[in-house]
Image: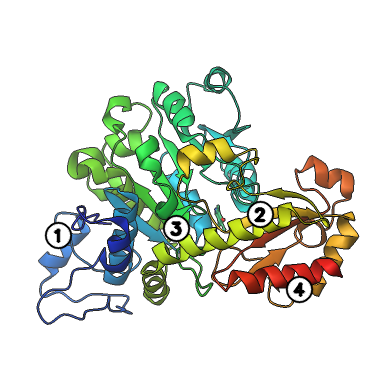
């Protein structure tokens, strides 16, 4: 909730290790797990001032908790934002990010290349709540994008590096058109993480994360985060965002932009959405996330290095029909990658095996080191064959229409020794 930029002058690797938490004399060196729902005060007056938002302080973990705040601060600093909040999942993060400024009767523009869970959230659940969405191809021209706006459009949403399509969002293009229409650009930065891309530097206003993936890094807890750059001027488009710029009667007439300035968006998310919907992470899970973040810079480098080596190997393999990874020079996303992801992208690659759906299943079953799981983006190499799992109800034609070829294998390359990963893939391809 409080994005104090205590480490703004340090480089990102240092923020990974030490950001977000500065213990004072005699306090624990490691962020403590404050596993307490409530916090004690001496007078009712003190407590009342907290409820009125007159004083900062902890009183109930659904609204704020020191462990959660320390880890949110670290992520805030990594992204270069002014305020951040943790949520209990990536799904909750994306829902809150949108619902904080859009409600029934409003309209949203979203890239069509997004995570399936987010697509369902926006296309189904939020539609049921009265929010309409226009999905656009990420390759859309600025002119065509411009034509999709309506008077009630409240935001534009996309994924920096789409899961699982691996399409890269042209952040500058989307931000420019969004700003021309007086609305913010929200991007999900789960796959690149701030190690490889800091979307605020390209004009995005708000960043979301499923911290379940690389940020946690070890697949031990589900979580999410929302970070605000503080750059979008809500008061300039006051009529579009009354929730931020007019009195909140449930908080004694607080006007968030007046009382909290650049932190208005995150404070409103805390005082309204967390209060009413309550998707807060447990402090224990936030602790695991904090520990994971301390090695994020080392792990991302290794994920990318290993994935690139495997992608180059597969490109030349006679039993592999195609490989998709933006690090490869002839990849369709390589130009955008050079601009937005110059130091690396992530560890996820997709490829097709010669022989289609059946050969893909055989390949999967023959792997020994790489595990078959629905999860992606953690330290252990894992694989998924959408045609026989997440998309198994579809026939080959339906799969192609959904942008998933029957032979598509998604491999989330871990941080093991790359020679062992390649050897495992090779022996499985032989079968
Ligand atoms: C996994 C994922 C989500 C959903 O996050 P959960 O933590 O599983 O709720 C959202 N966006 C992207 C890009 C993801 O990969």
Q: Point out the frontmost of discs 2 and 3.
A: 2
Q: Point out the frontmost of discs 3 and 4.
A: 4
Give the residue at x 34% y 33%. 242
Q: Is mark 3 within 8 Å of ligand 1?
A: no
Give the residue at x 28% y 41%. 230
Q: Earlier in the sequence, mark 2 or mark 3?
A: 3
Observer able to see residue 211: no
Q: Residues within 10 Å of mark 2 (few under 14, many from 20)?
A: some
Q: Which mark is residue 60?
A: none
Q: Label 2 vs label 3: CA separation?
A: 46 Å
Q: Label 3 vs label 4: CA separation?
A: 42 Å
Please indicate whether residue 82 sits to the left or right of residue 175 in the image.
left
Q: Which mark is residue 312?
A: 2
Q: Label 1 vs label 4: CA separation?
A: 59 Å
* Residue 265 image offset from top left, x and y in percent: 32, 44
Of helix, strand and loop, which one carries label 3?
A: helix
Q: Which residue is mark 4?
A: 367
Name the quadrant of the C terminus: bottom right
* Residue 405 image offset from top left, x and y in percent: 80, 48
Give the residue at x 23% y 75%. 39
Residues at discs 3 and 4 in contact (Cβ within 8 Å): no
Q: Label 1 vs label 2: CA separation?
A: 60 Å
Q: Which residue is mark 3?
A: 277
Q: Point out the frontmost of discs 1 and 4.
A: 4
* Residue 29 image offset from top left, x and y in percent: 22, 79
Q: Residues within 10 Å of mark 3 (few under 14, many from 20)?
A: few
Q: Residues within 10 Å of mark 1 (few under 14, many from 20)?
A: few
* Residue 76 image offset from top left, x and y in percent: 31, 54
Q: Residues within 10 Å of mark 4 (few under 14, many from 20)?
A: many
Please indicate whether residue 198 sits to the left or right of residue 89 in the image.
left
């Amino acid at each position: 909730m409080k994005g104090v930029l205590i480490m703004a002058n340090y480089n990102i690797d240092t923020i990974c290790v030490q950001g977000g938490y500065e213990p004072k004399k005699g306090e624990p060196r490691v962020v403590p797990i404050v596993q307490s729902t409530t916090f004690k005060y001496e007078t009712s007056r003190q407590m009342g001032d907290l409820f009125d938002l007159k004083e900062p302080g902890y009183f109930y973990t659904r609204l704020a908790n020191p462990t959660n705040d320390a880890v949110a601060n670290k992520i805030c600093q990594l992204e270069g934002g002014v305020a951040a909040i943790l949520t209990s999942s990536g799904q909750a993060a994306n829902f809150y990010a949108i619902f904080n400024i859009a409600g029934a009767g409003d309209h949203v523009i979203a890239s069509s290349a997004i995570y399936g869970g987010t697509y369902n959230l926006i296309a189904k659940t939020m539609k049921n709540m009265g929010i309409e969405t226009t999905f656009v191809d990420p390759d859309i021209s600025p002119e065509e994008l411009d034509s999709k706006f309506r008077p009630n459009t409240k935001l534009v949403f996309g994924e920096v590096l789409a899961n699982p399509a691996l399409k890269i969002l042209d952040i500058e293009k989307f931000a420019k058109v969004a700003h021309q229409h007086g609305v913010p650009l929200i991007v999900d930065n789960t796959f690149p993480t701030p190690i490889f891309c800091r979307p605020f530097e390209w004009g995005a206003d708000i960043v979301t994360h499923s911290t379940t993936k690389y940020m946690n890094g070890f697949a031990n807890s589900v979580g999410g985060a929302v970070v605000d750059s503080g750059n979008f001027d809500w008061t300039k488009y006051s009529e579009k965002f009354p929730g931020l710029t007019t009195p909140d009667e449930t908080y004694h007439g607080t006007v968030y932009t007046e009382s909290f300035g650049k932190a208005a968006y995150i404070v409103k998310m805390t005082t309204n959405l967390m209060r009413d919907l309550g998707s807060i992470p447990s402090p224990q899970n936030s602790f695991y996330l904090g520990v994971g973040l301390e090695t994020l810079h080392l792990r991302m480098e290794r994920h990318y290095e290993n994935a690139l080596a495997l992608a180059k190997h597969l490109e030349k393999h006679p039993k592999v029909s195609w490989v998709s990874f933006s690090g490869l020079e002839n990849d369709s996303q390589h130009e955008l990658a050079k601009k937005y992801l110059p130091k690396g992208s992530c560890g996820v690659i997709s490829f097709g095996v010669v022989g289609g759906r059946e050969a893909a299943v055989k390949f999967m079953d023959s792997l020994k080191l790489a595990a078959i799981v629905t999860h992606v983006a953690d330290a252990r190499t894992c694989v998924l064959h959408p045609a026989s799992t997440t998309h198994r109800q579809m026939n080959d034609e339906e799969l192609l229409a959904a942008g998933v070829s029957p032979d598509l294998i998604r491999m989330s390359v871990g941080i093991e020794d790359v020679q062992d990963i390649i050897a495992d893939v090779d022996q499985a391809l032989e079968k």
